[in-house]
Amino acid sequence: MSFRQVGHKQTYLIFPFTRLYKLTGGGSKTISCTTTEFNMKLFIIAAVLAVAVAAPSGYKTEEKKYEKDYKYPEIVVTNQSDVRNLDGSSHWSYAQSDYATRAESQAQKKFVVTKVDDYGKETKEEVYGNTNQGSSYWVSPEGEKFTLTWVADDAGFKPKGDHLPVAPVHVYELPVAPVHVYELPVAPVHEYVLPVAPALPYSRTGLGY
């Protein structure tokens, strides 16, 4: 900013980031000055904002619990069993301190399968295989409880659980074939007059007549 005074007439020339001075007295004087006060204020504000952004937040986020320094509660097995029989059947189960449980059993079963040879001929054959059934229970980190049961045999794997998706049931209305009523044609009736043979103009005599 520069300020010029000539007599009693004052002229102000204002530039950015300058301080305005008022001069008194007579004569003609010109003063030019530049100040860094405004720049210093901007610098202080920017520094405070930078420190505020860089400072760690006092609120713990959900992601914080899954970092390497987070110590999960120790999970121990509270109950466990394992039984294996000579006939090939078995049963085992366990329970944990986080309320998770699992039990599973299997048994030998005879199946009748159909085999097809290279020529397309089908033959029946008896084979032995394992059937399996079991159940499992656990609690999610959000506190939701899940129960799963299943059976696996010659009919396939069949799980059950409220959390499993259910295929939508589509109700289809089968089309009905249209009924066509046909009127069968009737054959025309023709009336014919059979011709009569003319009488012979003579009479036959002899044997047989």
Image: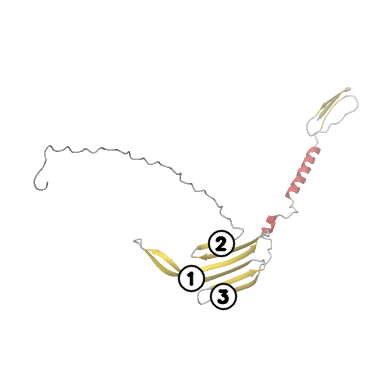
Please give the label number shown on residue 83. Answer: 3
Question: Which one is in front, 202 or 177?
Answer: 202
Asked if residue 133 lies left or right of residue 202, the reply is right
Asked if residue 148 lies left or right of residue 50, the reply is left
Placement of 161 over or under 108, stated as above or below: above
Question: Which one is in front, 125 or 81?
Answer: 125
- Residue in the picture at 80% in, 40% down: 41
Q: Earlier in the sequence, mark 1 or mark 3?
A: 3
Q: In the orientation shown, which residue stands out farthest toward the bottom? A: 86
- Quarter of the figure that contains the N terminus: top right
- In percent of width and height, residue 198 lies at 17, 37
Distance from Cα at disc 1 to Cα at disc 3: 18 Å
Q: Earlier in the sequence, mark 2 or mark 1?
A: 1
Q: Quadrant of residue 95?
A: bottom right
Please give the label number shown on residue 109. Answer: 1
- Quick one: SS at disc 2? strand
* Labels 1 & 3 near each other (Cβ < 8 A): no
